[in-house]
Image (cartoon, rainbow, N blue to C red):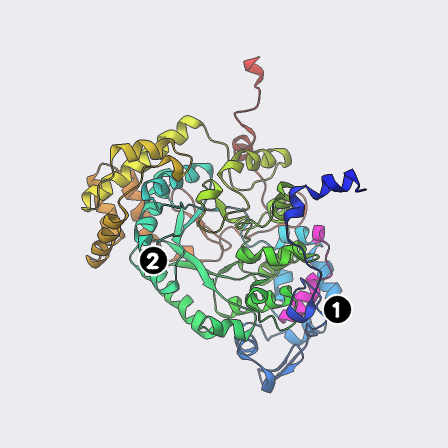
Amino acid sequence: MKSKRFEALAARPVNKDGFVQEWPEVGLIAMNSPFDPKPSIKIENGVVTELDGKSRAEFDMLDTFIADHAIRLDGAERVMAMDSLEIARKLIDINVSRKEILDMTLCITPAKLVDVVNKLTIVEIMMAMTKMRARKMPSNQCHVTNVKDNPIQIAADAAEAAIRGFDEMETTVGIARYAPFNAMSLLIGAQTGRQGILTQCALEEATELQLGMRGFTTYAETISVYGTEPVFMDGDDTPYSKAFLASCYASRGLKMRFTSGTGSEVQMGYAEGKSMLYLEARCLAITKGAGVQGTQNGSVSCIGVPAGVPGGIRAVAAENLIAMLLDLECTSSNDQTFTHSDLRRVARSVPQFFSGTDFVCSGYSATPNYDNMFAGSNWDAEDFDDWNIIQRDMRIDGGLQPVKEEDVIRIRNKAARALQGVFRELGLPAITDEEVEAATYANGSKDMPDRNVNEDLKAIEEMMARKVTGIDFVKALEKAGFPDVAEGVFGMLKQRVAGDYLHTSAILDENFHVISAVNEPNDYHGPMTGYQISDERWDEIKNISQAIRPEDI
């Protein structure tokens, strides 16, 4: 006979997930691999001659880059000699400032960083994240995509996401040639909802840079780095080529961050027996050495790999913390589905959600998951109310706020009409009133009429050949009768001239004021310090429409 209890448990969603026992030899271990190197450094005549147990003659290209560019040598030997436990205890000591911590952690090697965070429980990691986040105020980012690459729906979804509180938005494509339309629609829709929102289109890097230079996008983050040389080489890249690419974005006034995360090297078969966290620490050191302001990390699209091994979700939080210990903007993932269990997907997000990171999600899906072209998200449009109520329950700020249905309908309609006007003024295939109406009330692409894809793709090719830029969108919006949206797009174009939003962890408010780690640094040092939810912000968070009001009784 079988136990009825075990039959019931076997049918639970969590038991549809994949799990494996640790297998260090192939890298299927989250932290503390027996093959991880011991921390060490030697410096001779201002040159690192030993790094984490390797002599300079043994360095691969990652070691060389890290040794030459990623470690503050002044004080490195002193800090490396400190007990890792002593540094770990300082991370959660409210009497030790963030600056004091950085004076230590910017001087140490990847293996030492890992050794330090290995000493922390998940609660201690969260405490450290609260202090070490770069920008005082947490924020959030969303994905705006659909399976049809429908530009009208993208504009409407972006406008709604804006009034729901997202400060950054990312799109991608099903058909690569649709990218200019998707990027343009996201930009216009976002600025309709709230001026100052940063937008990007995730593509291969050359196209992504071109769209940014033309003013279709305002930031980028899909510039991937890896923790072993074979994986880097597999992508025809090196740390040096990625650093060069980063400088290309910065020189054109485009905010950008690198992307990395635990599990990528295992997925590609070249983990070299090292733990996922150690390899991610190398990625983050490369990010710092390249002069990049931030990182998208937290396993990201590889989340199924660490999630399948013991302690893997703790390792994901630990890698977010390491990014902060290197004074990087941390956009902390929570963006790809990885489990059949609602309980587990919430638990995965708790460390970042409750502690607050620069961007709690690097892709909360602003659409139903069937429309999410990033393989589905851990959070999607059907979770908006849950997210808002969790904020309300815990009195935390996860970047979002409740909205009224009438406001959503109004802003979606305005964004769709604005894009309709731009298409008309630029001579692009017409957006019909039927499409505007559908986008106004749609939940997803199933509610949208089909467009003539071939006609759209031909028009995109012609538009790009005409060298259309963001300035043309500004002119078209003005002519179409949307001067406020035109002002928003123009305001984003001006930002790349000033360059202030290239600072670490920069976002913009509705008046285009930069909020970053430079002018709003995290100054947490215990209760009632650091980011405190204002009375006005708390009113936004707590006033959900579902709550019964005394005056209604």
Q: Amino acid at mark 1?
A: Asp
Mark number for residue 83? Answer: 1
- Give the secondary structure at mark 2: helix
Image x and y of residue 419, in percent: 28, 41
**Range of magenta residues:** 108-124
Query: Is 128 included in the stretch rendered in magenta?
Result: no
Between marks 1 and 2, how big is the CA–CA gap?
A: 45 Å
Q: Is residue 457 above or below residue 450?
A: below
Image quadrant for the N terminus? top right
Residue at which label 2 appears:
212
Residue 53 shows up from this direction: yes
Secondary structure of the residue carrying tag 1 is loop
In-image side of 473 versus 439 (left or right): left
Q: Position of residue 457 (x, y in %)?
A: 26, 52
Image coordinates for residue 299, horizontal then vertical, percent: 57, 58
> Is residue 44 rendered to the left or right of residue 440?
right
Q: How many marks?
A: 2
Q: Residue at x 80, y 41 (%)?
A: 3
Q: Amino acid at mark 2?
A: Gly
Principal SS element in the magenta part? helix
Q: Mark 1 or 2 closer to N-term?
A: 1
Q: Nearer the viewer, residue 220 or 519?
A: 220
